[in-house]
Amino acid sequence: MPVPSHPTRRSLLLGTAGTAALLAAGTGTRFRPGAPATLAPVSRAGSAADVAVLLTAAPTTVDLGAREVATWGFGDRVPGPEIRVTAGATVTAHLRNDLPQGTTVHWHGVRIDQRMDGAPGFSQAPVAPGGGFDYRFVVPDPGTYFYHSHVGTQLDRALYGALVVEDPAEPLSYDAEWTVVLDDWIDGTGTDPDAVLTELRGNPRPPQNLRSTLLGGSAGHVAYPHYLINGRAPEAPEVFEEAPGRRVRLRLINAGADTAFRVALGGHRLTVTHTDGFPVLPVRVDTLLIGMGERYDVLVTLDDGVFPLVAAAEGKNARAFAVVRTSTGDAPPASVVVPELDRRVLDLADLTADPSVDPGDEPAREVDLVLRTGGARGTSWTIGTADASDDTSLRVAVAHGERVRLSFTNDSRIWHPVHLHGHTFRVRRPGGGGPRKDTVVVRPRETVTVDLLADNPGEWMLHCHNVYHSELGMMATLGYGDTPPDTIMPGMASEQH
Ligand code: C2O
Ligand code: CU
């Protein structure tokens, strides 16, 4: 099977150890031959397992296949460079900011040292234009993660990439793995995300024509001109090639800003093995819904043929599309009917954390949070208390070592993918169990309850991963102790290099 030519990502590498690690990733990520069953053991800082990368955020032009667009990215491709590292190793990422505005990099889902979290106003001030910042952190847990800018609407440009943390004792066996990054794209198409935000600020009501039963009502605010798999529009799709009969691990990441995707591989069922990095008891489904900020890992055993890999933009009557090829023959058109999309869809209630990652004990305290529309001081969305007259976004105070139950009730007319920084939680099912995650979809009129162990001191963002909702106010915090430290304020002095 010929290996398609994906040029090595233009990331500048720092240090020889990092060079080896990242070059391996750049050339072999999607089409790695052989089973990654034997990986290098976890090693200490300074060893060859550590990874160093330079991320330069800058205005750029990227080719989506359907067209070229001017945008802001980490190089001339979208997604930005994939970073692969072994759990326990250290990532050093030097951010250089050549954008005309401040930026940060957030390592989504990683239980990270708070100072490295890239949360503007919390862990650092935005890195000013012309400045830089060294992110240096240990990756404690294997799994599928991603990194993205956390300033304003920058996530809805090309400022994101996959972060894959390999398990030195990977229990799954598979022959190859593909990273599949989903995105909704509008930047450089005659408008940009800041213009979208301005429009939504004036009118936060979602349009009537974007609706989904699966999402419980409104699907989103923006009908995007393009939906992408690994930066490619359906007109010029990514082609994944493997031999028939091979078992492949797909790492699905939703890096979109306002779109949930319903993912299916024509002619195949999906065995879900992980969500948000953490293993679950395997479940076989035909399709799954992935909200912004969520990740799912699935295994498929490839049939003989040419198959559509479809990520339908849920409720938006459009799709992202790629091709899976295990033999010669014509590729299906992007519009091909994929019956799996309408068959059995994964439900959150299907998922149970693997016992090895189930945090166990029952929390002693429950905090009720309500997701609302409206709010004071010009906000359109809030995460507040159960008291409806209290329309400010709030701070949840926890004690170090405490187990806390958070319950999210959605009192608005649109779904929200709620994400917590610095921690993972166990979604609580009636009757026990539930997956371990960091981002969870909460539909209108639904209550989702999660249990967490407060074991990572700091001030952490707790927000909707719809970038427009969070920019318009759907942002709370979870902090340790009764009052936040006074260094936590927007515009605190940044560490510039
Ligand atoms: Cu990926 Cu605060 O988020
Ligand atoms: Cu939201």
Image: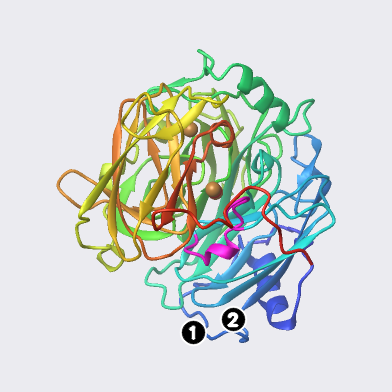
The answer to whether residue 299 of the structure is visible from this angle is: no
Q: Position of residue 340 (x, y in %)?
A: 40, 35
Q: Which residue is mark 2?
A: 49
Asked whether 88 or 409 is in front, the reply is 409
Q: What residue is rendered at 77% in x and 45% in y? A: 72
- Indicate the secondary structure of the residue bearing disc 1: loop
- Against 384, residue 327 (above or below) is below
- Against 42, residue 58 (above or below) is above
Asked whether 126 or 236 is in front, the reply is 126
Q: Is residue 115 magenta?
A: yes
Q: In the displayed structure, does residue 119 sit left or right of residue 132?
A: left
Quadrant containing the C terminus is bottom right
Q: Position of residue 489 (x, y in %)?
A: 60, 50
Q: Look at label 2 and name its amino acid.
A: Ala
- Majority secondary structure of magenta residues: loop
User: Disc 2, disc 1: CB below 8 Å?
Assistant: yes
Q: Is residue 233 magenta?
A: no
Q: Position of residue 383 (x, y in %)?
A: 43, 35
Q: Which residue is mark 1?
A: 41
Region rendered in magenta? 110-123
Q: Position of residue 428 (x, y in %)?
A: 25, 48
The crowd level at tag 1 (other Cα within 10 Å; few <14, some 14-19, many 20+) is: some
Asked whether 186 or 446 is in front, the reply is 446
Q: What residue is rendered at 58% in x and 76% in y? A: 90
Q: Look at label 1 and name its amino acid.
A: Pro
* Mark 2 vs 1, N-terminal side: 1
- Against 494, residue 314 (above or below) is above
- Against 299, residue 237 (above or below) is above
Residue labelled 2 has its Cβ within 8 Å of some atom of ligand 1:
no
Instruction: Tell which residue pokes out farthest to the top in this image.
Output: 208
Asked whether 437 or 395 is in front, the reply is 395
Instruction: Tell which residue pokes out farthest to the left in this image.
Output: 431
